[in-house]
Amino acid sequence: MLSWPMPVTLARAAAVLGFVGASLGLSPASAQQDSSVLFRNIRIFDGKNAALSAASNVLVRDRTIEKISVGDIIATGQVIEGGGRVLMPGLIDAHWHAMLVRPTPMASLAGDIGYNNLLAASEATATLMRGFTTVRDMGGPSFGLKQAIDEDLVAGPRIYPSGAIITVTSGHGDFRQLSDLPRTIGGMLSRMEVIGGSMVADSPDEVRVRAREQLMLGASQVKLTAGGGVASPFSPLDVSTFTEPELRAAVEAADNWGTYVATHAYTPVAIQRSIAAGVRCIEHGHLMDEASAKLIAEKGVWLSTQPFLDISGAAALGPSEQAKMRQVVAGTDRVYALAKKYNIKTAFGTDVLFSKALADRQGSMLAALTRWYTPAEALAMATSINAELLNLSGLRNPYPGKLGVVEEGALADLLLVDGNPLENIALVEDPAKNFVVIMKGGKVYKNIVPR
């Protein structure tokens, strides 16, 4: 066992460090490098207001925005000359699947786990480089990826994980084969369950266990599939899956942890049953009717939906899945019209699965919101409004602090845009060219500002 030759007190250690600093010609104050970043001469889209600020300066220190001023700010750290460019909050995708973007459906289930994790890490870096500094992961084994990103082993966005999708036998998210049936209650887990992609639960007690497991693993919210879906082979869109008592079991488990349940739900029955059980966020909703929209608004439930319009580049789907996708796309205009009519709290997400080509168009999907909203409204949805949804996680929020805004005290997730996205939202479609600085948590991950 190694030991010091003599006791070393904190004071003695400090003296030693002071001697080393002095021998290098450094004062104690300057021995630590100033990690602050000053953005000089920029105009600000703060994530909320539809107008840019006057020419301003923004000082970032210790992962947060320390000061915003139209006057000069004295700083000794890095200085980025904005040249009148626009500084805005990092983008947030409220419906993402970090582990399921690039592999094929078969590879995600049967492929090598190590390779799939490396693939997800590569995609996480690409996601960040598209300007999305935060994602709400709505199903998949992303806990390890999140940890690697948080420890700065991998460059990627903040992840609000749901963990495994909780589904019923034959429901959306049940990717077992018919040869896997019949299911033995309490028997061996399927491959999709072993890797943490989906968990089958066919009673309130099973739902409660699976929800608690995801919370134990670190879920910031719990995700269930309350109705049919597009990609699952044995899940017609019109079916309703979980019963109200089953949904309520998950809601109770999440509520005990101070967080919430979101459900995949397209149809009126799935939506209304979810709300009756206490679900606080509906994912998708493309087949909703007027009564469902009214109920969502009256109960203050969130709608996290996606502008499904152009699906070229999407993952290859079989004939039945293609037919279901066409139904969903046909409902896109209606869901946004109802959201606007009833002033529903609406979040933006993309729900990209099994397609790098579609992921590369993440910014284009955001720009597509201008079919129904102004550029300022669309950008607010992808920043400050999405951040409000993230706050539903309460004490399960893995990143306490303000996201989605440019204001003093907020977390420093920032984009410097070469152009004005409030006038030309198409700038977000080409992040490689137009996002000249990408910062997350006060760290600069990209800086191509000419010097």
Image (cartoon, helix red, strand yellow):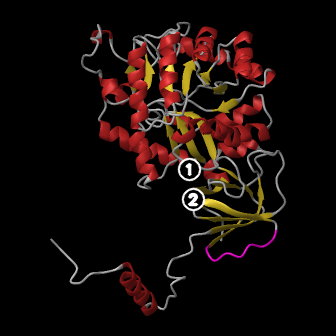
- Residue annotated with mark 1: 129
User: Of 69 and 277, which appears nearest the observer?
Assistant: 277
Picture quadrant of residue 264? top right
Identify residue type, mark 1: Met
Q: Are marks 2 and 1 in contact (CB under 8 Å)?
A: yes
- Residue annotated with mark 2: 446
Tell me where the magenta segment starts and ends, as one range: 71-77
Magenta-drawn stretch contains 74: yes
Picture quadrant of residue 298? top right
Magenta-drawn stretch contains 396: no
Q: Residue 451 in the image: x percent, y percent?
A: 65, 71
Classify mark 1: helix, strand or loop: helix
Q: Residues within 10 Å of mark 1 (few under 14, many from 20)?
A: many
Let me know if residue 178 appears in the view. Answer: yes
Q: Residues within 10 Å of mark 2 (few under 14, many from 20)?
A: some
Q: Residue 30 in the image: x percent, y percent?
A: 54, 82
Let me know if residue 119 appears in the view. Answer: no
